Image (cartoon, rainbow, N blue to C red):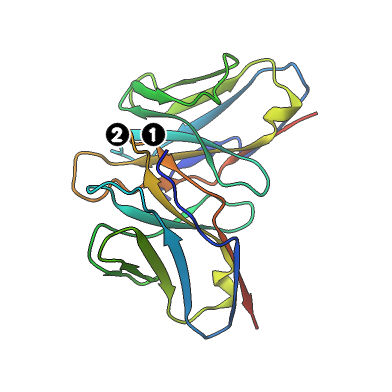
């Protein structure tokens, strides 16, 4: 299985930037890195994805290391509504469209 | 709302009964996925379809679990002879393949199963 490693939990103060790291040293050359977040009792919500270049959208930015073995999700100004579990996921190494989730990072935002 | 739709959202059943969940993917999405999630864990892959073909099944899917997508549109996940260990949230997701968009998958809100 394609494996990602994330810290179990992180804390941030409201209105401050948050950098959520993910290691994916076994990533293949053609695989996109996807990030999702999940609020309690809801399905995972798509946040952002990228292949090689850094990406920005209205929710977040994604910084991808040059060797693609790690990436960082950046929330520019954390709000209380950003408190969630954040997952970075890859396709399974077999090349099928089976996406593997780890346990993610639980982000706590302090008012 | 044109997102992934799952029904029922909640189901309580007695051990030994059969249950069926339905998933309606986003229109024109040709890939459909089922995941299971228990408390404190990330979603676990169960199976996925490309159109009507079931291309991969997890070993988590015992012979009591079956999924279908008969016309390449909606899908059903059936659990026969439910056990208490089947209590979980069952998530459906869909994606549009055949493009260079990265095959982003979009999840529904999940169907909660409680086996008593």
For disc 1, the marked residue is: B32
Instruction: Kindly identify which chain the residue marked by label 2 belongs to.
Output: B
User: Which of the numbered marks, if any, corresponds to residue B30?
Assistant: 2
Is any atom of residue B2 visible in this view?
no
Q: Is residue A73 above or below residue B23?
A: below
Residue B65, quarter of picture:
top right
Residue A64 in the image, given as x and y percentages of width and height: 31, 65
The reply to whether discs 1 and 2 touch (Cβ–Cβ < 8 Å) is no
Residue B34 in the image, given as x and y percentages of width and height: 48, 33
Name the element at disc 2. loop
- In front: B26, or A18? A18
- On screen, residue A3 versus residue A93, left or right, reads right
Disc 1 packing (10 Å; few <14; some 14–19; many ≥20): many
Name the element at disc 1. strand
Instruction: Kindly identify which chain the residue marked by label 1 belongs to.
Output: B
User: Which of the numbered marks, if any, corresponds to residue A82?
Assistant: none
Query: What separation in Å lies between label 1 and label 2 (alpha carbons)?
Result: 7 Å
Please identify the quadrant where the C terminus of chain B is shown.
top right
- In front: A62, or B78? A62
Q: Is residue A10 above or below residue B20?
A: below
Q: Is residue B54 above or below residue A49?
A: above
Residue A38, quarter of picture:
bottom right
């Amino acid at each position: 299985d394609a494996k990602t490693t994330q810290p179990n939990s992180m804390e941030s103060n409201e209105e401050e930037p948050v950098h959520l790291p993910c290691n994916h040293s076994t990533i293949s050359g053609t695989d996109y890195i996807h990030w999702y977040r999940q609020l309690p009792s809801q399905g995972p919500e798509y946040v952002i994805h990228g292949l090689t270049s850094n990406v920005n959208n209205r929710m977040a930015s994604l910084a991808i290391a040059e060797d693609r073995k790690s990436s960082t999700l950046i929330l520019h100004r954390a709000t209380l509504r950003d408190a969630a579990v954040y997952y970075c996921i890859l396709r399974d190494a077999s090349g099928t469209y089976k996406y593997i989730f780890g346990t993610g990072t639980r982000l706590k935002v302090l008012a | 709302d044109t997102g992934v739709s799952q029904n029922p959202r909640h189901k309580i059943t007695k051990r030994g009964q059969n249950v069926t969940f339905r998933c309606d993917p986003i229109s024109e999405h040709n890939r459909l996925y089922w995941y299971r999630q228990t408390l404190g864990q990330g979603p676990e892959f169960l199976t996925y379809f490309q159109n009507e073909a079931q291309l991969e099944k997890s070993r988590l899917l015992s012979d009591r679990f079956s999924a279908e997508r008969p016309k390449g549109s909606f899908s059903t996940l059936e659990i026969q002879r439910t056990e208490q260990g089947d209590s979980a949230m069952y998530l459906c997701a869909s994606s549009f393949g055949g493009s260079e968009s990265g095959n982003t998958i979009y999840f529904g809100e999940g169907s909660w199963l409680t086996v008593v």
